[in-house]
Image (cartoon, rainbow, N blue to C red):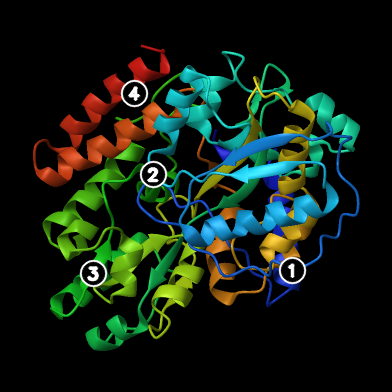
Amino acid sequence: MKSKSLTVFSIFVVLATLLAACATATAVPTTAPTEAPVAATEAPTSAPAAQSTCPLPVEKGASIVFSGWGDTSEQKIYTDSIARFKAVCPDVTVDYQPIPDKFQDKMKAMMAGGTAPDVFYVDDQLMTAFASSGQLLALDDYMKQAGVSTSDFIPSLMSEFTLDGKTYGLPKDWGTLGLVYLPDAFTQAGIAEPTENWTWDDMRTAAQKIAATGKYGGFCMAADWARFAPFVLSNGGNFATADGKTATLNTPEVETMAQLVADMFKEKSLVRPSDLGASWCGEAIGKQLVGMTLEGGWMVNTMKQTYPDVTWKTVEVPQGPTARADIIFTNAIGVNASTKYPIASAALAIFITGKDNQAAIVQTGFAYSTHPDQYSMITNEYDQAIAKGGLLPDSVPAYWGPYTGKLEDVVSKALDRVFLGDQTVAQSFDQAQSEAQAALNGQ
């Protein structure tokens, strides 16, 4: 999975050129993995859809259910998307039924019970559960009929939703992480603000000084594989080999960075959100409880809507011993193979992830478009800094094969054991290596 393959990142090089050419261009990732709620600005429901015809000749009188996760602001994004879809596909009735909590568990239960929605969000966990069992509809024939190709999307985002040469989901957005910070915390500590030349050691030193003021925590991080990933990737490590068959969690590249995190926690320059009375680190920033954290583009609208009076900034993730590297997240829209209306369902999936609807969503500041030629549409300076992480040559997609979810869970639990003081880094990551390998073996 190491990005040296550059299949994906040839596209990112193009995007980086666009970024350099457009000083005001920024991108907003939507996926907030593990701990963060997703927020969005209000999208204009009356905005006309650029697309004038339905992507497919849908079944007359089709009525379908569409479900995804997300808070009320994300739900508005898709309510508006459905309105745009209805304008071009008037024969289709879409019943939007969001599932904000425990989406994956509920989807699995509904699929087993025959009550799953026709169209729904698909992540790596649901792709693994549903694609190989024939419960997701292959979209290739519908895409061909609609004039849509997998090459329309950023290549790295497609790998997660392709199995045996067939496409089972179309990526709806992507995201990455940046260093989010409060300038006032640095002022209070009497130190300079972060720069794009920062290393993890620079971050640690600043976190120590900020924590010493007693007014803020230094650096916020939960026991979370996603926020730990940039540390590891920047040290030349990874959670597994590129083919997703061999775990690599007890390597020096991983353990060195785990020890850095553990040492910061022990000296109290690193705090968990729960230590601050916050539900996630973005909230800790918004409530001005901590000086720094790693979060994504969802922070733009979280801060705008919930903490509009708080001054905050962003820079790229810090440099590690061997590279500056980030993690890339994505989710897709998929179709239930048992849907009564497969054409209408495929049409909705194609429309939501299509260029016209993606362009409308980008303008709200909610998500990065999954179409590489739309990168220059982004406008927020804070997102610009965060999004650069996805353009770095050593950044990788958060996907390690069909057992990605289990692997990620193993890494988070390893960090949790270290934070709790139950095990040393070596002990915890030796255990994690064994557990991860079993998971990757399908055990």
Q: Do tag 4 and tag 1 residues touch (Cβ < 8 Å)?
A: no
* Closer mark to the observer between disc 4 and disc 1: 1
Which residue is disc 1 drawn over?
46
Q: Nearer the viewer, residue 96 or 320?
A: 96
Residue 148 at what x, y percent from top left? 84, 38
x 82%, y 47%: residue: 90
In 3D space, how far apart are the residues under numbered discs 4 and 2 (Cα atoms)?
Answer: 26 Å
User: Quarter of the image containing the N terminus?
Assistant: top right
Which residue is disc 3 drawn over?
218
In 3D space, how far apart are the residues under numbered discs 4 and 1 (Cα atoms)?
Answer: 48 Å
Horizontal side of 58 relative to 391 (left or right) equals: right
Q: Earlier in the sequence, mark 1 or mark 3?
A: 1
In 3D space, how far apart are the residues under numbered discs 1 and 3 (Cα atoms)?
Answer: 44 Å
x 28%, y 77%: residue: 288
User: Quarter of the image containing the C terminus?
Assistant: top left
Q: Earlier in the sequence, mark 4 or mark 2?
A: 2
- Mark 3, secondary structure of its residue: strand
* Vertical comparison of 144 with 200: above or below: above
Residue 272 seen from this side: no
The kind of residue on which mark 1 rests is Ser
The kind of residue on which mark 4 rests is Ala
x 68%, y 43%: residue: 94
Q: Nearer the viewer, residue 417 or 50?
A: 50
- Mark 4, secondary structure of its residue: helix
- Mark 1, secondary structure of its residue: loop
Q: Earlier in the sequence, mark 2 or mark 1?
A: 1
**Disc sitting over residue 101 in the figure:** 2
x 11%, y 35%: residue: 423
The kind of residue on which mark 2 rests is Asp
